[in-house]
Amino acid sequence: MRILYILQGRSFFSELVKRFYEGGPLFMSLILICLLVAIFFLIRGFLYLNKDGEVSKKMSALASDASLLGLVLGFLGSMIGLITAFDIVEATDIISTPRLAGGLKVSFLTTVFGSITFVLIRIGLIILKTFQKS
């Protein structure tokens, strides 16, 4: 029941927006665009399932490529975030453990968002390919 309360409350969505901006609006926006484009191709793949099988397969391939791009962008954003965090550690003589942990947390937000993008689209592609074969 607590999960339903969290999902329905405004705090869940405000937390998502907060994490989105923490991860860096540039890379998080690019990953979000990849997610939306992949969902678009996936829906078109389902729509063309009975009309034209070749178009459906092309749409599934494009959705796969868009989700993979989102995953790679997530890793790239994470690596750039880690380099930035380590540059700050190098420039500062004394750094606190909480500050270092916070920087590492922020650098991994893009990886998590990219991985979620990849996994969600992969689940959709598995379902689409199941219908394409039958």
Image (spheres, rainbow, N blue to C red):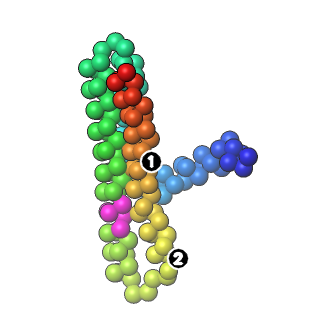
| Residue at the (44%, 69%) spot, across then down | 104
Residue 32 visible within the image: no
Residue density around tag 2, few if under 14, some if 14–19, many if 20 or more, within 10 Å: few
Q: Amino acid at mark 1?
A: Ile
Closer to the camera, 99 or 52?
52
The residue at which mark 1 appears reads as 116
Q: Main secondary structure of the magenta part?
A: helix
Label 1 element class: helix
The residue at which mark 2 appears reads as 98
Tell me the quarter of the image containing the C terminus.
Answer: top left
Q: Amino acid at mark 2?
A: Pro
Residue 74 visible within the image: yes
Where are the magenta residues, as a range? 78-82
Label 2 element class: helix
Going by the picture, which residue comes out furthest to the top?
51
* Residue 77: quadrant of the picture: bottom left
